[in-house]
Image (cartoon, rainbow, N blue to C red):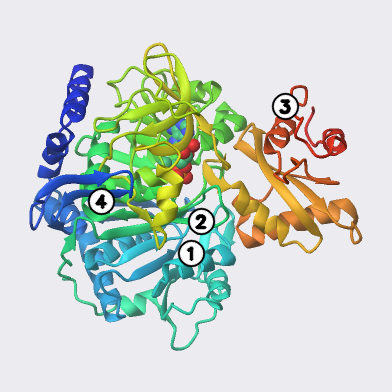
Amino acid sequence: MINKIHSLGGYIHEYQKSVANPQAFWAQQGESFFWRKRWDKVVDWNFDEPKIQWYVNGKLNITENIFERNLYTHGSQEAIIWEPNNPDEESRTLTYSELFVEVNKFANTLRRLGVGKGDRVAIYMPMVPELAIALLACARIGAIHSVVFAGFSANALKERINDAAAKVLLTADGGFRGDKITPLKQIADEALTNCSSIETVVVLKRTKSDIEMVVGRDIWWHKAVDGQSEVCPAEEMDSEDPLFILYTSGSTGKPKGIVHTTGGYMVYSGYTFSNVFQYHAGDVYFCTADIGWITGHTYIVYGPLLAGAKTLMFEGVPTWPDAGRFWDIVSKYQVNQFYTAPTAIRALLAKGNEFVEGKKLSSLKVLGTVGEPINEEAWHWYHDHVGRNQCPIVDTWWQTETGGVMVSPIAGITPTKPSFATLPLPGVQPVIVSNEGKELTGNSVEGNLCIKYPWPGMARTIWGDHERFRQTYFSSYSKMYFTGDGVKRDEDGYYRILGRVDDVINVSGHRLGTAEIENAINEHPLVNESAVVGYPHAIKGQGIYAFVACGELSTGGEDGIRKSIMQGVTKIIGPIARPDLVQLVPGLPKTRSGKIMRRILRKVAEGDATNLGDISTLLDEDVVEQIIDGALVDV
Ligand code: WT7
């Protein structure tokens, strides 16, 4: 198995080895997996093109590493433990052997539908075991999965299906979330009016909602699977064959299809899972993310299953039927490792301690967080009330693009500090770079977070647009991967992530491009132009503040317009992108050359209009006065 770190000295030793000789280090991690043909070369790379290849010419299938490799030892052990949205509904568990059968049957179903190696399969599903089965079935036959979070709108789904030219869409009649049902099939139908690549839609019955089935295009999941063979030979994949595409937001309007490949992603997800969470055989591990995001891909599905772990999948939300839901699940299944997002912690903290007190949480050994900086208050509440002062917190910094955790404590081994992601994992070489591109060495420095050496889990390209990949991540600073985050290295050499330095905002751990939201706002017939910035929000981390310039305010008055702008964004992107505040302004502050001065708007949204910095290039100072006067936060 993977090299497991057992002590701080062990971590330091592994880290030094990984920097002194990355090839030898990653070769050693690769050894613990099953390759049909071993690689010729561990890594081949340059950050100019960029070209990144790991385990070059290796041949494998990631599902053989989950199933065939684990079955002798873990066949009868639970692989997936599934807790439904409604606590009164029966839960489900699938052992490794049972999951293998389901994956094979569904893989055969996909093959029968004409899906082959390299074809794209779009997935728009609720958090049910079939979602994990779908990912693994694609991987079994070499199809590239593209999961679209089931909270996205029809329009967002359409864009993603078309960008990847997916052949098949997997969805469900609906999805349960708290006391609501998301009409997934209905949304998918709307999306598909403009998706010519889709040949078949496979529909899982979940909510038993009334839906329409399009003859010749739609088939029921259970009917399609019925009678399929339980044996499905795995497709032989090259290390660098794509495993999946996952869309994420960037600083321009169009979402980016981040591409992860097979060999490197497998080694990296397995290695980081086992080490960061210090998973031990038999433990129950619960990550509360949705599989629609990278956290779910790497740390609900691939990482844990590669390690032969028991991974808990939860369909519902943290606050329904009440704010004790997570803790009831922890106690029901005796969860040992629990991984969630700061926004969930803040939301539960705000509901009061009565929901956590008295719950049986003594099984917990490790707590984790991901997605955004965790503030000290939330950290301490998590530590004291959930962890009963006994569980280390791993504050894991990473991104969709990095594939797995990059900077994080090793649970119980690295001494922690509230709101610090602490130290890089072995194989990760972070550098802090000034705006001028100078590497800032030593401690007590602050700047832009870059990585100067590749790691196996990193993204290889943006689907269909390698030039955008180069431009976005490798052009800001020469020969380095630029993360988009600001960071501080303190006097102890510990890393603290300060948040995005680009036009990306992080709302409840969801990453959104401000340009994407502006595009949606600008579709409103009365809107001339808009500018969106983040502002501090007690629960969400950042809220969405939109400054909108309209022509006439004819119908419905200001409130009506504000509301219809919010509804428009919900329709075009999804509820997660709905602005919290919409301020109607006479115009936007611009430079003489016509560039919007976002810095000023950010200051206003932060409630600090006292120090706007240099405004000498401003075209019209009156506009700024009016914006400050009409601000929706105290300035
Ligand atoms: C951005 C990536 C990786 C899974 C979830 C988000 C922010 C992520 C942390 C953390 C401070 C964090 C960064 C990063 N972020 N983890 N522990 N501390 N910030 O993935 O949607 O690709 O977003 O989330 O700003 O760049 P993502």
- State the residue at coordinates (22%, 39%): 271
> In the image, which disc is placed on residue 160?
1
Q: Mark 4 = which residue? A: 79
- Badge 3 local density, few (<14 within 10 Å), some, or many (20+)? few
Which quadrant would the N terminus be assigned to in this image?
top left
Q: Mark 2 = which residue? A: 255
Earlier sequence position, callout 2 versus callout 3? 2
Earlier sequence position, callout 2 versus callout 4? 4
Could you tell me residue 382's position as x and y percent? 47, 26
Could you tell me residue 125's position as x and y percent? 45, 63
Q: CA distance from mark 2 to mark 1?
A: 8 Å
Q: Do tag 1 and tag 4 residues touch (Cβ < 8 Å)?
A: no
Could you tell me residue 608's position as x and y percent? 74, 25
Farthest residue in the bottom direction?
Answer: 216
Q: Do tag 2 and tag 3 residues touch (Cβ < 8 Å)?
A: no
Amino acid carrying mark 3 in the image: Asp
Above/below status of 317 relative to 570: above
Depth check: give the residue in front, 355 or 547: 547
Earlier sequence position, callout 2 versus callout 1? 1
Amino acid carrying mark 2 in the image: Pro
Q: Nearer the viewer, mark 2 or mark 4?
A: 2
